[in-house]
Amino acid sequence: MFFLNTILSIAVPSYNVEKYLDKCLTSFSDERFNDRLEVIVVNDGSKDNTQQIAEGYVARFPRIFRLINKENGGHGSAVNAGIENATGKYFRIVDGDDWVKTENMATLLDVLEHSEADMVVDQKREVDMVTGDTEYFPLPEQVAKNQVADFAAICNQYEICTYIALHTLSYRTELLKKHSIRLLEHIFYVDIEYIIKATMEAKTIEFLDLEIYQYLVGNVNQSVSSQNYVKRFSHHSQVTRELIRYATESKAHGAMKEYLDKRVCLLINTHMNIALIYNKNRREGLRQAKDFRSFLKEINIAYYKRTYKRYAITRILHSLGVDYDKLQKLKR
C-alpha cells in the first residue's frame, strides 16, 4: 500500500524486540496520522514474535503501518530497506525498542508538511530502562528555531553537529534516493555513517523546539556500552574506515569540508578511545591503535596529523592504566 499524501516515512528497524515493539508502535497509533504518516516496520529476520506484533498493527491501522520481512542484515540493512520503500516527503528512523511523543508527532507532521528544509532537527529525551529516570536534551539557546537556514552557514557554529543525530533528524526522502545513500550492512555503528553522508548532501536545515524521540538507555546489550564497543571493535573500524574513505574522496570545500573533517576526526578519536581506554586487554588495545594509526597515515595524512595530539594524550592515559570507569570519574 502506498500513501499518496504521506508527509513522513518512519523506518522501524526491528530485530527480536517483542518486549518493546508494542510501546513503540502504539506511539504512532493515532487516527490523526492516517495517510500522513507511514510507519515501515522492517523485521530484520527476528526469531521472536516481532513479526506477529507488527502484523497486528498493520491489520488495525492499515493507513499508517506497513511491514517488510527480510533476512537478517543488521541495522544498516534495515535502514536501507526503509529508504528504498519510503514514499513520504521526509524520512526518519525510530528503533524498535524506542518510541515517540505522540502529541508532538502530530505537531511535527504539520511542520514537515509545509517545511522547505532538506533537514528538520527536533529534540530527544533519554529514558533509563531500570530507574525510569529521564534526561531531556534541548537545543542550545543560540540556535534559531522554526526557520529555514543555510546549513553551510551554520554547520560549524555552536557545536550543533552533536544535535544532528539519528534520533532527532527528519530528512528529505528524495535526497536520500537521488544520492543513493546506503549504509554498510551486517555491522553495528552505522548511525554516524547515515548522519555524515546525509548531512553532506543537504543545503538547508530547520531546528524545532519540539521533543519527539524517547530513547531507551541502560540496556547492557546496547551497542554503545563500553564493552560492546570493545567486542565489536572490528565493526567500529569498518565504519570509521568507510567514512575516512568517503571524506578523502569528497569534493567538499569551505565550511562543509571543515564540518566533514570535524565529524570524521571526532569519530577517529572515539575509535582510539575504544582501543586504548575501553579495552581491558591493554596489549591488544595498543596493537589495534597502532595498526589503525598506520592505516590512517597512509590513507589521509591530514587526518593523521589533525588527530595526533589527542592520540598522544590517549596513549599517556593508556600507559597510566586509565580505563573506561576511571575516565568517567575524571570527567565528573
Image (cartoon, grey):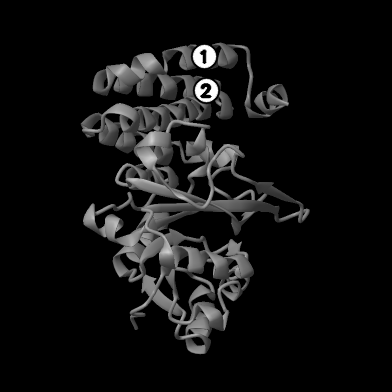
Quarter holding the N terminus is bottom left
Of the residues under marks 1 and 2, which one precedes in the sequence?
A: 2
Given residues 100 and 58, the one toward you in this image is 100
Q: Looking at the picture, which amino acid does disc 1 mark?
A: Arg
Label 2 near label 1: C-beta < 8 Å?
A: yes
Given residues 317 and 280, the one toward you in this image is 317
Q: What's the distance in space between the residues labelled 1 and 2, CA to CA?
A: 7 Å
Residue indicated by mark 2: 276
Which mark is on residue 157? none
- Report crowding for label 1: few under 14, some 14 to 19, many 20 or more residues within 10 A (C-alpha): some
The picture places residue 249, in percent across and down from the top left corner, at: 21, 32
The picture places residue 130, in percent across and down from the top left corner, at: 75, 54
Rendered residue at 68%/25% (across/down): 331
Quarter holding the C terminus is top right
- Relative to 270, does residue 78 appear above or below in the rendering? below
Residue indicated by mark 1: 315
The picture places residue 247, in percent across and down from the top left corner, at: 28, 32
- Relative to 232, does residue 57 appear above or below in the rendering? below
